[in-house]
Image (tube, rainbow, N blue to C red):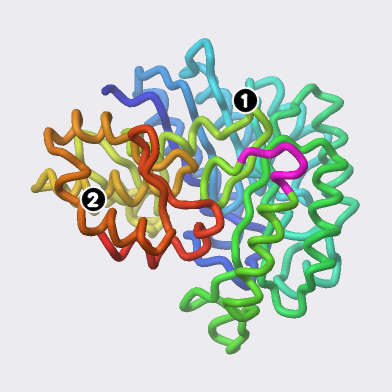
């Protein structure tokens, strides 16, 4: 299938979070202008029309007015009729003028890096906003008719309590947020937390918090459609479903990864090299079983899991026959369910998905 989705990576931030290992540098006006101009050239040379476009980072909202408008206006001409045009925002970067730039250029979904509404915990992870910044931004977006909003929620932060989690969820629901992404804090190598030997909360505590989040949001009418994502009906992330359903997509930007013609590729993390077009490290699939395995691990992240009829048609094999021992073992341990030609992970076992995937 031709590409219908595009990912753009903006590797600039005004402040570096203690847990983040994404490709990013401190925002620099002149470097960002060179980078955006280079991206826009590539965008303008692309005649494709996209159903979903997602701008991530780093922090795209760190761009100044001119840079943000230039990037968004170039992308807005590549949108299909029924589109989802998403951008990641940090609350402290946004003002009325930037919101107007979003609206003018057809952005219709935003993802806000909240992590928590507890101002003390925000300082612990070196976030640069507070609770009021988030609430004010959401109210302004609503006033501009942008209602398709995702909030990121982090659990496992040092000294975070279950009451903190409940308070975060209470606020999110009270703000009528239709999509919530929740992540356990991981201490990644070379981050500030790793260098300073900071520990996240232990696995058992994180599992307890995750279970609580799942139960709370389910009771509030959210669909747990992917291991880390919850949405009200009709508000699932169309772009992220492209990833999880194993569909192809194009990528642009330093450190970004794309998937085209059965090949995954990653651009250099170096902004200098990217601008000089010393760019791609590519890894092509040589064997069909690479794609088959990826299909399994991606689809088991989803609520509905693997559609066995679809799998059999795609790979010309019988899923139940080829993986009979794995299926039997996972069913015996009550980790998965086989039902109506669907094979999926029980929701209460999502937290140990990595253990389940080792069977394949």
* Secondary structure under the numbered disc 2 in the rendered image: helix
Does residue 354 appear in this view?
yes
The residue under the point 69% across, 20% down is 104
CA–CA distance between discs 1 and 2? 29 Å
* Residue pictured at 86% horizontal, 58% vertical: 167
- Horizontally, residue 307 falls left or right of residue 97, namely left
The disc, 1 or 2, on the residue closer to the chain's N-terminal end is: 1
Q: Tell me the number on the disc at residue 293.
A: 2
Instruction: Say if 48 sits above or below 216 in the image.
Output: above
Q: Nearer the viewer, residue 309 or 269?
A: 309
**Would you say the residues marked 1 and 2 are in contact, meaning their CB atoms lie under 8 Å apart?**
no
Please rate how many residues cluster around mark 1, counting C-alpha atoms within 10 Å: few if below 14, some from 14 to 19, many from 20. Answer: few
Residue bearing mark 1: 234
Range of magenta residues: 217-223
Helix, strand or loop at mark 1:
loop
The quarter of the image holding the C terminus is: bottom left
Pinpoint residue 239: horizontal percent, then vertical percent: 49, 33
């Amino acid at each position: 299938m031709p590409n219908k989705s595009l990912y753009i990576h903006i590797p600039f931030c005004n402040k570096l979070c203690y847990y983040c290992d994404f490709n990013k540098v401190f925002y620099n006006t002149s470097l960002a202008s060179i980078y955006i101009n280079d991206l826009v050239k590539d965008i303008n040379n692309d005649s494709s029309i996209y159903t979903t476009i997602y701008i991530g980072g780093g922090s795209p909202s760190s761009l100044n007015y001119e840079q943000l408008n230039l990037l968004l206006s170039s992308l807005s001409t590549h949108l299909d009729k029924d589109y989802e045009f998403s951008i990641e925002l940090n609350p402290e970067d946004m003002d009325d003028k930037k919101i107007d730039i979003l609206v003018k250029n057809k952005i219709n979904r935003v993802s806000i890096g909240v992590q928590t509404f507890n101002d003390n915990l925000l300082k612990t992870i070196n976030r640069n906003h507070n609770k009021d910044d988030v609430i004010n931004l959401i109210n302004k977006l609503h006033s501009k008719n942008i209602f398709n909003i995702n909030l990121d929620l982090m659990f496992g932060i040092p000294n975070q309590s279950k009451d903190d989690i409940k308070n975060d969820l209470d606020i999110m629901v009270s703000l009528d947020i239709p999509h919530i992404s929740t992540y356990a804090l991981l201490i990644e190598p070379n981050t500030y937390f790793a260098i300073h030997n900071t520990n996240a909360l232990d696995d058992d505590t994180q599992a307890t918090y995750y279970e609580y989040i799942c139960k709370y949001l389910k009771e509030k009418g959210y669909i747990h459609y992917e291991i880390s994502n919850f949405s009200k009906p009709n508000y699932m992330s169309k772009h992220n479903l492209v990833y999880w359903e194993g569909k192809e997509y194009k990528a642009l930007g330093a450190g970004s990864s794309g998937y085209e013609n059965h090949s995954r590729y990653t651009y250099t993390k170096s902004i200098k090299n990217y601008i000089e077009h010393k760019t791609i490290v590519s890894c092509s699939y040589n064997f069909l079983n690479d794609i088959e395995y990826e299909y399994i691990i991606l689809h088991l992240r989803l609520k509905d899991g693997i559609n066995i009829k679809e799998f059999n048609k795609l790979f010309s094999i019988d899923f139940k026959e080829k993986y009979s021992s794995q299926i039997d073992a996972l069913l015996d341990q009550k980790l998965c369910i086989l039902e109506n030609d669907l094979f999926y992970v029980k929701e209460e076992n999502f937290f140990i998905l990595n253990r389940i995937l080792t069977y394949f």
